[in-house]
Image (cartoon, helix red, strand yellow):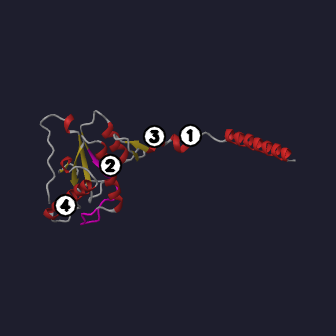
Amino acid sequence: MIRFMFFVLIAVAGIALAVSLKSCADRHSVVGPAAANFASEVAILGDGTPMFAPNGTVARTLADWLQDPRSTERYFEVGGAQFRPGAIEPLPEAIARLTRLAAMLQAYPDAEARIVGYAAPSGNGHADAALAHNRGQHVIDMLVADGVRRSRLGLADRPDRPAGAPGLAADRIGIILRYPKRLPANAVIRPAQRA
């Protein structure tokens, strides 16, 4: 009787194994649509860090530009809502974008960034300029807190993209990214100024 039970147990185990192998063969490929679209959704930064940056987004444009060995200098709009009127503290969604920018700058240590602050015109040009400057300085301080060396950051003016430009938020920042080692010797970045 024990031999019979042992035989039945081995037979059942064999059938179970055959059925499980058959069901594995019937399943879809391991590389599904999500894995197939991985390259269009994720950028791999210079230090190997993966970052969610779908094609067509500012994050992907930044990542691709930083990775391109021909890149020298380019202005980028950060996009989206960035500041409440009169505030220097970015909105939460802007803080998330700045955190990703810090990760990108850390992955490409030869790149430098100049931050351009903007403020909606209030009728007081001096107050608007001070607010724009303070926003830029605050963003620099946030990037430094996220691990970017202050010596790689600076403030800049961008008069060709005024605060009231059509299609752009007035209360925002822009970023000028550059690779100083790839630029002519007379191109210099202005160091960050404390407010």
Residue contact between numbered discs 4 and 1, judged by CB atoms under 8 Å:
no
Give the residue at mark 1: 31
Q: Earlier in the sequence, mark 2 or mark 4?
A: 2
**Quadrant hosting residue 12:** top right
Instruction: Judge whether 140 appears above or below 55 on screen.
Output: below
Q: Earlier in the sequence, mark 3 or mark 4?
A: 3
Residue contact between numbered discs 3 and 1, judged by CB atoms under 8 Å:
no
Decide whether residue 83 is among the magenta residues: yes
**Circle 3: residue type:** Ala
Distance from label 2 to label 4 (Cα)? 23 Å
Give the residue at mark 4: 134
**In the figure, is residue 53 to the left or right of 65?**
right
Q: Earlier in the sequence, mark 2 or mark 3?
A: 3
Give the residue at mark 3: 39
Distance from label 2 to label 1 (Cα)? 28 Å
Task: Quarter of the image for the C terminus: give it.
Answer: bottom left
Residue extent of the magenta highlight: 75-89
Q: Which of 164/11 is in front?
A: 11
**In the figure, is residue 4 to the left or right of 24?**
right
Instruction: Judge whether 21 appears above or below 117 on screen.
Output: above
Residue 162, visible in the rendered structure: no
Q: Earlier in the sequence, mark 2 or mark 1?
A: 1
Instruction: Judge whether 15 appears above or below 126 on screen.
Output: above
Secondary structure beneath label 3: helix
Crowd class of label 3 (few under 14; some 14 to 19; many from 20; radius 10 Å): some
> Residue visible at 56% across and 40% down?
31
**Circle 2: residue type:** Ala
Q: Which of the two marks, 2 or 3, is nearer to us in this view? A: 2
